[in-house]
Image (tube, rainbow, N blue to C red):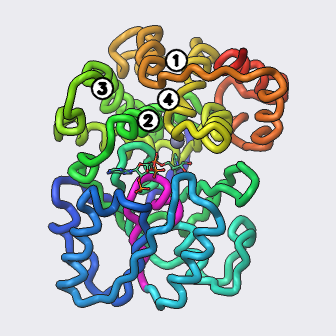
Amino acid sequence: MVDFKSFMPVEIIFGRDCVLNNKDKFKGYRKIFIVTGKSSAKSSGALNDIQNIVNDTKAEFYIFDKVQENPLLSVCYEGGKAAYDFGADLIVGIGGGSPLDASKAIAMFAANPDMNPDDLFNPPYKNQPLPIFAIPTTSGTGSEANPYSILTLDGQDVKKTFNYIKSYPQTAFLDPKYTFSMPYNVTVSTALDALCHCIESYLSVKSTPFSAIYANSGIKYIYHNLEKLIDLKDKSAIESKIDYNIREELMIGSLCGGVAINTTGTCFPHPLGYNLTLINGLPHGKACAVFIGEFLDMHENFISDEMRDAFKIPIAKVKETIKILTDYHEKFDDETLKFYVSKVKTAKNFTNSFKKVLTDEEMFTIYKKCAGK
Ligand code: NAP
Ligand code: ZN
């Protein structure tokens, strides 16, 4: 028999209007600190739902809307100070992975006002983080179902993961209606991210029979919808053409990916993708997807019948679909790629997959194949 451990303490509430239908979850909280990006919390309708609840419960609320894509450590620190000054007793993250990840760091800083920004990565902590509610408005990161907070170090174009056992959201509210406002490109990139999580998790040395169930289910929910997204590309009024069923399946698939990587973490497509995001501005999901074809090639002998069945079509066609949606054409010279290797080579994810990537040369070779001149 196989031995494994699993820990996933998040209460998951899924479905249309799930926030409004579960307003009792907000009872007892008097000072609610809401963490968002610039506009998606509003355009998705999620902030409005929260404000209606807070009006009912007569709690005070504070909206911290300074979180940008690939959140900066300094902004989370600023959010933590603001939450502490406000006297917050609950952090509510609304948005894509960026605000959700930021809310985990903010919850820790708010509970530990004496901490410096870098202390976030250096446990032990004096106090436990404030409770977090997570409300995703993208179907991609699965951040609502894990404790990871992937932060950008100021001025360094480097991402670092804050990962603490008490930083899981207490409750995640997943309502597919919040994703209707996502532009087509965000829908595609975030869906690719979710698929990468499932593929990387399934082919991770840390994969367990339990995490593999989620990874493979995620593939089933996500992949066939990616083919639909290709078909929808040239239609007008695209957001409304991606119907509720597609959005629902993408959200479940993304959640499955989040639960799967909660056990395994991700593999090399993620750290290699960070440079394309932070230096070249490619959205996170597409940046990881640039490397997933090579990842699948390197793991050809490890792909089980069960995984092939989840895709329902040959892996070669899967790679083609991912390539079309990723739509990535930029190529870099060797010097740039060596610099990229130097920025990410200490990431732990390189050793997570069955085919471990150990040396700078191996990282360079993958970069060269996927994004080299
Ligand atoms: P995001 O960075 O949170 O948001 C991307 C863009 O989409 C933003 O402009 C955002 O607008 C917009 N947006 C989000 N939801 C929308 C909606 N419903 N309607 C309209 N616009 C919307 O995107 P993401 O891909 O979900 O998250 C990426 C981040 O998550 C990265 O920092 C990545 O490192 C991290 N990540 C975390 C995990 C994890 O396990 N914790 C896993 C993978 C990735 P606003 O600025 O207005 O919000
Ligand atoms: Zn990701």
Residue 197 visible? The answer is yes
Q: Is residue 70 magenta?
A: no
The answer to the question of whether label 4 and label 1 lie on touching residues, with beta carbons closer than 8 A, is: no
Label 1 element class:
loop
Q: Residue 303, labelled with which disc?
A: 1
Mark 2 or 4: in front is 2
Q: CA distance from mark 1 to mark 3?
A: 25 Å
Q: Residue 189, labelled with which disc?
A: 2
- Up/down of 135 relative to 57, above or below: above
Label 3 element class:
helix
Q: Nearer the viewer, residue 174 or 11?
A: 174
Mark 1 or 3: in front is 3
Mark 3 is on which residue type? Answer: Leu
Label 4 element class:
helix
Determine whether, in the image, residue 123 is placed left or right of residue 216.
Answer: right
Determine whether, in the image, residue 341 is placed left or right of residue 262.
Answer: right
Question: What stretch of residues is rendered in magenta?
Answer: 89-102
Residue 1 visible? The answer is no
Q: Residues within 10 Å of mark 4 (few under 14, many from 20)?
A: many
Q: CA distance from mark 1 to mark 2?
A: 24 Å
Mark 2 is on which residue type? Answer: Ser
Quarter-of-image position of residue 217: top left
Q: CA distance from mark 4 to mark 3?
A: 19 Å
Q: Nearer the viewer, residue 346 or 42?
A: 42
Q: CA distance from mark 4 to mark 1?
A: 10 Å
Q: Residues within 10 Å of mark 2 (few under 14, many from 20)?
A: many
Residue depicted at 74% across the width and 57% down the height: 155
- Up/down of 131 relative to 161, above or below: below
Q: Residue 229, labelled with which disc?
A: 3
Looking at marks 3 and 2 on the same chain, the residue that comes earlier in the sequence is marked by 2
